[in-house]
Amino acid sequence: MSSSHPDFQVASRLANIAPFHVMELAKMAADLEKQGRHIIHMGIGEPDFTAAPPVIEAAARAMADGKLQYTAALGIPALREVISAHYRRVYGLDIAPARIIVTAGASAALLLTCAALVEPGTEVLMPDPSYPCNRHFVAAFEGRATMIPSGPEQRFQLSESMVREHWTAATRGVLLASPSNPTGTSIEHGELARIVAAVREKGGFTIVDEIYQGLSYDASPFSALSLGEDVIVINSFSKYFNMTGWRLGWLVAPERLVPQFEKLAQNLFICASSIAQHAGLACFTPESIAIHEERKAEFRRRRDYIVPALRELGFKVPVTPDGAFYVYADCSELAGDADQLTIDILNQAGVVLVPGLDFGPHTARNYIRVSYATSMENLQEAVRRLREYFSGKRNTQ
């Protein structure tokens, strides 16, 4: 038998999918930790809290009771029903459980949505900056993400006028996130309503990623689902419910599209984790909600510390984030290249920050993303190290 390996040719679509720079920095940080360095991680967007105790107990019960088999592709009915009740309690919306599809994380929800709606060669509008995987989901189905430069004047989000200006014959829809990764900014309700109306007028689709909607700090929460049954919303158990590794999310779709999503889910994933689904039921109990709200208040406290601290260090924070756990900070007065700055800070100060490189070309060189999904003690120590780092740079100039 020959031991040689054939030189397979990979699909050409891979050329449109870039490496995730956040993870590359995480690997560099891991190498430094192996050398004995203490590293403060403010890069990856993962809550330092884990699942609430009632959720962990529910998972243990599910395993003990043998609830380990495949579920329906759309998710267990009880979970779809409690998610529906959640929309009624928090947002005052009557969302039929039949419209709710439980997925293997928000990533699977986005993958299903793009598989259902993106044709080869078509365009999807999204802001620059935005979460990199969103444009890669579009590219995976041979569509093209049209990245529209969105600065602090637009809160790093799209507006109705931007959507109308950039809509072409090839455009199929828009993909938004509110609150956003990397900026932590939301789209104001009236502006989002105007965007949805403009897209509807064009016969396109509107997808809104709301995985950070539970972590909104400065205004009454609202869901894009209030703007019509044709809006598709993505959500997740990872952020507000602190269940990143459980890989559980959901999407809400127009009821007429649910059979199409079901067909795709059956073939691509079969179902989300049965254990995670049964555990997810416990996320919505009064006991768990109280825990999640306490943690949300802690995230807000961290935001209120880190934003002024970054400004004192010399970063510009042109828009105070109103949700999620990120600050998008302008470092142009401190360094000429955000990528090199984050590498230097990692090596010299032992703090992981993320350059704008991942999030689109418009802000790549001048912005960094700071995640405050870590303890207050870590944030305070990181600020001390950064102050020392920048003080040393000034002294050597």
Image (cartoon, grey):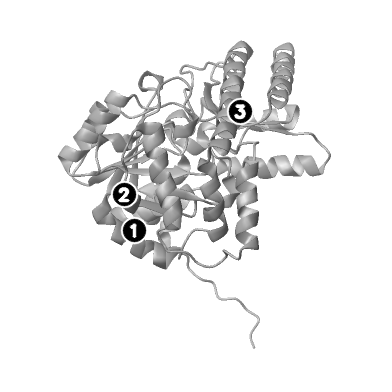
- Residue located farthest toward the right when viewing the structure as drawn: 36
**Disc 3 from disc 2: Cα separation:** 32 Å
Mark 1 and mark 2 in contact? Answer it, CB < 8 Å: yes
Q: Nearer the viewer, residue 307 or 256?
A: 256
- Nearer the camera: disc 1 or disc 3: 1
Q: Which residue corresponds to mark 2?
A: 253
Q: Could you tell me which quadrant the C terminus lies in?
A: top right
- Residue located farthest toward the left when viewing the structure as drawn: 201
Q: Could you tell me which quadrant the N terminus lies in?
A: bottom right
Q: Tell which circle, 3 or 2, labels the residue nearer the N-terminal end.
A: 2
Q: Position of residue 131 (x, y in %)?
A: 46, 39
Q: Position of residue 58 (x, y in %)?
A: 60, 51
Q: Tell which circle, 1 or 2, labels the residue nearer the N-terminal end.
A: 2
Neighbor class of circle 3 (other Cα within 10 Å; few <14, some 14-19, many 20+) is many
The amino acid sitting under disc 1 is: Phe
The amino acid sitting under disc 3 is: Tyr
Q: Nearer the viewer, residue 223 or 322?
A: 223
Label disc, if present, on residue 372 of the rendered structure: 3
Residue 371 position by quadrant: top right
The amino acid sitting under disc 2 is: Ala
Q: Position of residue 266 (x, y in %)?
A: 40, 66
